Image: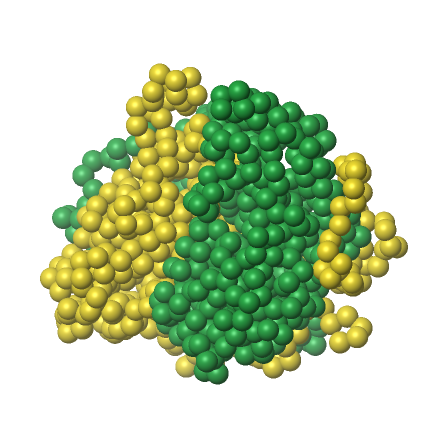
Chain colours: A yellow, B green
Amino acid sequence: MSHLFDHHGAENTGYSQPQGLPTKGQATVPKGLIRKNQARWPRLSEPEMVRHYTWLSKRNFGIDTGFYPLGSCTMKHNPRVNEVIAQLPGIADIHPHLPEHHLQGLLSIYYEMQHMLEICAGMDQVTLQPVAGAQGEFTAVRCIQEYFRLRGEDQRTKVIVPDSAHGTNPASAAMAGFEIVEIPSREDGRIDLDALAAVADETTAAMMITNPNTLGLFEADISAASAIVHAAGGQMYYDGANFNAILGITSPGLMGFDAVHFNLHKTFSQPHGGGGPGSGPIGVKAHLAPFLPGPLAARRTPTAEERSQAVDEHWYHWLEPEHSIGKVQQWHGNAGAVIRCWAYYRRYGNGLTTMSEHAVLNANYLRHAIHREAKRIGVDHLFIDGAETDIAKHEFTLSMQPAKDALGISAMDVAKGLLDRGYMAPTVYFPLVVPECMMIEPTETESKDTLDTFAKHFVEVLTVDPEVLHQAPITTPVRRVDEVYAARNLCLRHPFDDA
Amino acid sequence: MVDQLPNRGRELEMLQEMGFESMEALFADIPAEVRFKGDLPLPGPQSEEEIISDARRLLGANLALGQRPSFLGAGLYRNYVPASVFQLVTRGEFLTAYTPYQPEVSQGMLQAMWEFQTLVSELVGLPIANLSLYDGSTAAAEALTCAVRVHNRKASQPNTVYISSLTPPDKRSVMFNYCQGAEIEIRTIDHLADGSLDLESLAEAAGSCGVYLEQPNPLGVLDENLVRVKEIIGEHTALIVGVQPVSLGVVEAPGHYGADIVVGEGQPLGSPVTGGGPLYGIFACSQPYLRLMPGRIVGRSVDVDGNEAYCLTLSTREQHIRRHRATSNICTNETLIALMGAMHMALLGPDGLRVLAERNLQACQAAKEALQATPGVTLVHDAAHFNEFAIAVPGTAASCLAFLDANGITGGFDLSRWYPEHDDRILVTTTDQTSSADIAALAAQLALWSTHQEVNA
């Protein structure tokens, strides 16, 4: 083990820095504010610090380490040129309050990204300000809220979500002050139009739904669902978590949605970074555009004076929407993430359709290969599809309930068995509508060979003696972690000696 | 494009094995009426070489702060991030991992975040820290809603919080958006002419759910009055202090003068300014706030063999379990940037942090001395400052900044964007990256500006 707080170098040996600037008087802190006790931080030399974090990195699994079929998270390869670009001083060392003539490059990239996302989503206006998918959801429902307030429809206080929705949907709507109405999915995992029609009324502000849904199925009734909500006077909100499946094939706009968020860290490959940063732009139809957070990137013809500083034939500038809800982040969103995703988009351009096709191809192929391998070795009775369908979109679900009933093997056991075979586990126990659910999303950046080998290993796990499998994982840096112990014996920081 | 798709050229083989003849068969479930017609109206794909070439050209058209003397801060602070931080944080095991839902293969990031929690906890003087929120503004906003959740039942002013009247409008706007859903009213507390908090105005906040103040305040003033706030507002009103974390190398930790929640923009520790994001929001609190706080938190535990192991804990507050009753909707946070912060803190150590803070103090002092001696320029507040201070200039701030800009200096922030009642004030920001030559150039140009104004007057 390597522990950061075990490093106790001698005092005043820390990181070497230049001398401070000479001053005539003394630079002081008011007497009552002088820090009395230093933070008990460790003292490390650079070699010790580098070794500690390298050691930690070796105890962590990323896409670079191996296949990462984590459903709903779109763990595709992160091209390294994006990291190189994000460290250029023209993004790393710029301030969002610089005058527009010093930010023409950033503004033009923002404009290009807004425009691209508007086209892909079938929306009229995009803002890049929200910094995560959940914040995008929150921002969009806030816009919808203000839209209705301005129209005098204050009675629209409810947001409808299917029971298979991501947890962020109800959490975001509740944070904006909406009451949540949850509707059950049909037996086959798809939206229940009767249940929707029963709750959509003059109190409905919006319905939030993702399509393909969390089972990886395309909701063919989506236009009908939109019609029901619109007839009741509500707005349709598209959760873009599963956008990787449909780029260039269909769009939320074509499906009748009024607002959408994008998870750029999923679809456009901003690295997930162990939990962030992300970027969660939203797009809206024209009637919601005046409510978007500001500023947006806009453009016009440059003046003669501006022409010399322009990056192309346009002059780019910030624009404040007329009835803007204000800000959801203090600056212009996660600009560094937007730049990385711009670089990713440029790699595909109008070939984004091919990207989605390959994502769907890989998901269907992996589903096929798992069933094929299961039949080959005779374990096909131990799991079933999470939802009956001929084709999936970018992800699919399996229910391990038969294995649980027959052998006592849970979805979690299978997940841990996969860790021992060098894979990240699929998402487990989500969506809740599938018992013993495993949600698998291979993404377009995995080869056929990887998918074939994973399928073999997946079914092989089901042949392991259940008693042995309950012990998995055994090859990982630690074995099964006791989460109950963690919650009952809270230790949220280094205890030091005195605590 | 092709270099990102390993199965390019093998599509038909894979489709036929599944019993399909075309890619189209995989999309047969999408009704024709919602299908795109034709190709996406976008330019064609580019190679890596073309992309980086365009990136260099476009980003090169932006003005990097380091290209010339720059005094623009106002919440973001140009710093030096040690080379080892970049080298380590781009290791693929950190960079390309998801949220650590499978702790057995995520021990590296989990332990690093547990260490981050400890570093922040020690820095601000409170026992608990989460593993980051989006930025300083959302951390402040979430602190307000958290304070209401904790104190609303006993508050004589329920659903009410108070913030400093100096809080920048953009940050207030974030606060409003986060608070309005819970019908929380945000009121303001005034400041005196010297920039310090008006303790009489503060008295009105007693009995509310929380009070949000910054140290240093948004105009860079180090305010001794903050140490008296907790006794005035009492134990049933949360004291929330927003900090510039580097300052805590020399300035008392708010947890040591009664703060219940400390938030702040983490950027100056570990992250470049990056056009305003990604950054990371610091959020630390005392025990009573733990179970109603937002965001993820790592706990130390054991594995089945009794070995030390780490995992996410107290998840029942979070959206994926609690759904609409969650304490926050946050899911993706800023872990990687927080990791950069942890690395920078680890490398600095307590002495390195003190030295870094002293350098910031010295740069600020040097700039104040130079501008105090500059004809036409006055310092607005006679006070101690950290990083930045407000000056008044002849003419308008906007025209003065345009003059400086035309003469090769990014002069600071036009304070009329925050406080429209004064159109002649500039917030001048210095950091450890400010040089004596930068300050001399600013003073010389400001002197020139003052002369021009006199001549024109």
Question: Farthest left residue?
Answer: A231
Q: Position of residue A84 (x, y in %)?
A: 56, 35
Up the image or down, B182 lies above or below A48; here it is below
Q: Position of residue A3 (x, y in %)?
A: 75, 62
**Residue B411 or residue B39, whichever sits in front:** B411
**Residue B127 or residue B379, whichever sits in front:** B379
- What residue sits 75% from the left and 76% below the top? A499
Judge whether residue B216 can be spotted in this image.
yes
Question: Farthest right residue?
Answer: A10
- What residue sits 57% from the left and 52% below the top? B193
Judge whether residue A413 can be spotted in this image.
no
Residue A298 found in image quarter: top left
Q: Position of residue B128 (x, y in %)?
A: 63, 69
Residue B37 found in image quarter: top left
Question: Farthest front residue?
Answer: B457
In the picture, the quarter occupied by the N terminus of chain B is top left
Left or right of A386, for residue A205: left
Left or right of A19, for residue B190: left
- What residue sits 47% from the left and 53% below the top? B171
Q: Position of residue B312 (x, y in %)?
A: 57, 68
**Residue A81 or residue A108, whichever sits in front:** A108
- What residue sits 37% from the left and 33% below the top? A317
Q: How many marks?
A: 0
